[in-house]
Image (tube, helix red, strand yellow):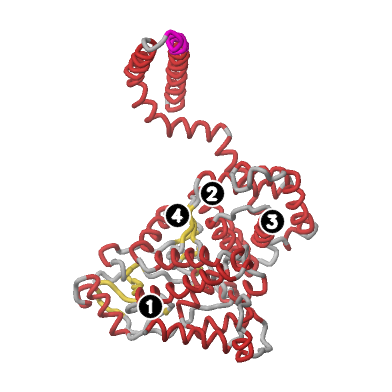
Amino acid sequence: MIRLARLVRIFAIAVSYGLHEFMPRVPGDFVLRLIAGRRPEPRGQRLREAFERLGPIFVKFGQVLSTRRDLLPPDIADELAKLQDRVPPFDPELAFAEIQRSLGRPLGELFATLERTPVASASIAQVHLGVLKDGREVAVKVLRPAVEREVAKDLALLETAAALVERLSPEGRRLKPRQVVAEFAHHLDEELDLMREAANASQLRRNFEFSPLLAVPEVHWDLCSERVMTMERMHGVPVSHVAVLKERGIDLKALARAGVEICFTQVFRDGFFHADMHPGNILVAVEGEHRGRYVALDFGIMGTLTDVDKNYLAQNFLAFFNRDYRRVAQAHLDAGWVPGGTRIDQFEAAIRAVCEPVFARPLKEIYFGRLLLRLFQTSRRFNVEIQPQLVMLQKTLLNIEGLGRQLDPDLDLWTTAKPFLERWMSEQVGWRGFVRTLRREAPYWASTLPQLPRLMHRALAEDRLGALRSAVERLTAEQRRRNRLLAALLVVALAALILLGIGLLQA
């Protein structure tokens, strides 16, 4: 009954905002369209306002949906990107009760003080500032009461709606609504487990432990649970407050370049990046030991990249810088993201048609995130399956470029990023990369080499057994044995040379 009532409310709000425009035509729907009438506002604005009326879970869904610019028309994606998670806070007594229940101790034993009024409130959780018994300042994040149950109900409705859209509309199938809802469910699942967010924060802090560019709060693990996360309180000015940063003497041009370097370091060095870098999650320290550094907050959504992803991205970025469109097309083919029967020359021509008009502009007017977006849209014509981690990265690049241009309108992402990428590529495929690979594989060779005689004896025994079965197989097995023996000797020789080289390097 509760789910039915929620469904009726969703339906009523959708009708009142004229969202029938997004629905496929079905027999008898003229009654619905007659009731809904026509509203003068653009369709994207109506969809955004409807999500805001439907509540925090739908606001969060709209935010995630806005990142799928490879699937949405630009006008809708731009409007949904305006959604802000300004949600009224819940009762502090409920928050304090949850902290005590989750951590198993009275508040008086855990904190010297804990502010009743939350400093931030969102659809999933809210944050209270406090001070520990030893005087350290902390921020305590607490999930909303029964948020998991509310999320589960709305997700079930979204999944049902997505299945109907796919069944009734060919255009709906192209937009992959069930895949989008599943992606949203994955994000929510990560954000509903604050231990996972705490682990993300700890990993990012370790990655940038000695960095002069980025500060990450320390996690207080003894004050964390699945529903409560306690971390070091960070002081700073929101990165979007440019006038305040100027007044405090912060070098904005250097700050803009540092943002680009932080982004590419996370992507290419670590393969682990903050995927929700909007202005509300980024501060700039204006005093103390962190002065001039970025400060990262909210680690619920992080992106990860494999070595294959990183190599693909580096190859593409450098090819873009050099306008080598054949290399871009080939990188897609090598990664297996283009169907095997695709004509590489046609794919190259489509990429050229996207990029050449962009490169005709001054470098400072080129937005790389937008270029990736147009490439994703072009790739769809060739049935390229856009990888979710790359869509998250494209969103991150859009955020970084937007922040960077706010700080320095003349920021040239290309000039700033190209030396970093060239250095990274040299380290991966040059002699430094070769030496690093040898050192990494040395323990494996050290454990494998002593086993080679036993493995060779087993192989020879198996060959002799096979030779007894038939005269023809005997000859074949003998030849195979000789080939394996030769290969084993070559492996031993190569391993000896590798170990000798490593010994010389370490000497």
Q: Earlier in the sequence, mark 2 or mark 4?
A: 4
- Residue 186 to residue 417: above or below: below
Gap in Å between the C-alphas at discs 3 and 4?
Answer: 40 Å
Name the residue carrying label 1.
Answer: 150
Label 2: state its secondary structure: helix
Which numbered tag is attached to residue 381? 3
> Which amino acid type corresponds to the residue marked 3 in the rendered image?
Arg
Which residue lies under the disc numbered 4?
208
Does the segment drawn in magenta span residue 11?
no
Say whether disc 1 or disc 2 marks the residue closer to the N-terminus: 1
Tag shown at residue 268: 2
Report how far apart the C-alphas of labels 1 and 4 lie in the structure: 36 Å
Rounded to the nearest whole Å, what is the CA distance between mark 3 and mark 2? 29 Å
Task: Report the side of 225 relative to 205 (left or right).
Answer: left
Percent of width and height locating residue 346: 75, 47
Image: magenta residue range: 471-479
Q: Residue at x 65, y 80 (%)?
A: 43
Earlier-in-chain disc, 3 versus 4: 4
Who comes first in sequence, dot 1 or dot 4? Answer: 1
